[in-house]
Amino acid sequence: MAEQPFTDDEYAFLRHVRFGELPPAVRPEQRVELTETESRSDRPEVWDDPVHWDLRHAG
């Protein structure tokens, strides 16, 4: 016997059980544009010069 997929209401219940109450949606008039002014700290700097290339790739 094949299992029946969950209904939208069942999926909504499971999301609520897992994540709890979601915060209210941000309205368009509450949105602001973000601009980065500093380099990202979660990514390494890119070095394009041959010396760094050789060091990084053991060449």
Image (spheres, rainbow, N blue to C red):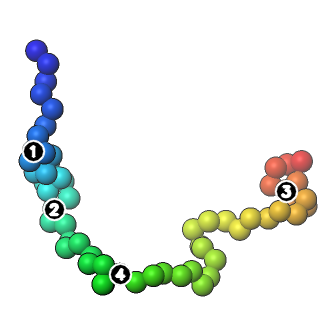
Do the residues bearing badges 2 and 1 touch, measured as CB atoms within 8 Å?
A: no
Residue drawn at x 67%, y 65% as measured from the top left: 44
Residue placed at 26% from the left, 78% from the top? 27
Vertical side of 44 occupied by 30: above or below: below
Residues at marks 2 and 4, CA–CA distance in whole angstroms: 24 Å
Q: Amino acid at mark 2?
A: Gly
Relative image position of residue 28 (x, y in whole percent):
30, 79
Which SS class for mark 2? loop
Mark 1 Cα-neighbour bin, 10 Å: few <14, some 14–19, many ≥20: few
Q: Position of residue 38 (x, y in %)?
A: 62, 82
**What residue is shown with label 4?**
31
Residue at 74% across, 65% down? 46
Dot 4 amino acid type: Arg
Give whichever of discs 3 and 2 has the lower sequence position: 2
* Distance from Cα at disc 4 to Cα at disc 3: 41 Å
Please, what is the three-letter code of the amino acid marked with disc 1? Glu
Labelled pair 2, 4 in contact (Cβ < 8 Å): no
Q: Earlier in the sequence, mark 1 or mark 3?
A: 1
**Numbered disc 3: secondary structure:** helix
Q: Position of residue 9 (x, y in %)?
A: 8, 47
Could you tell me if the residues under marks 1 and 3 are in contact, i.e. CB atoms within 8 Å? no
First in sequence: mark 2 or mark 4? 2
Residue linked to disc 1: 10
Neighbourhood count class around disc 4 (C-alpha, 10 Å): few under 14, some 14–19, many 20 upward? few
Q: Give the Cα separation between the discs numbered 3 and 2.
A: 47 Å
Q: Which residue is mark 2?
A: 20
Mark 4 lies on a secondary structure that is loop
Q: Position of residue 8 (x, y in %)?
A: 13, 45
Q: Look at mark 3 in the image and give the residue it sits on.
A: 53
Q: Secondary structure at mark 1?
A: helix
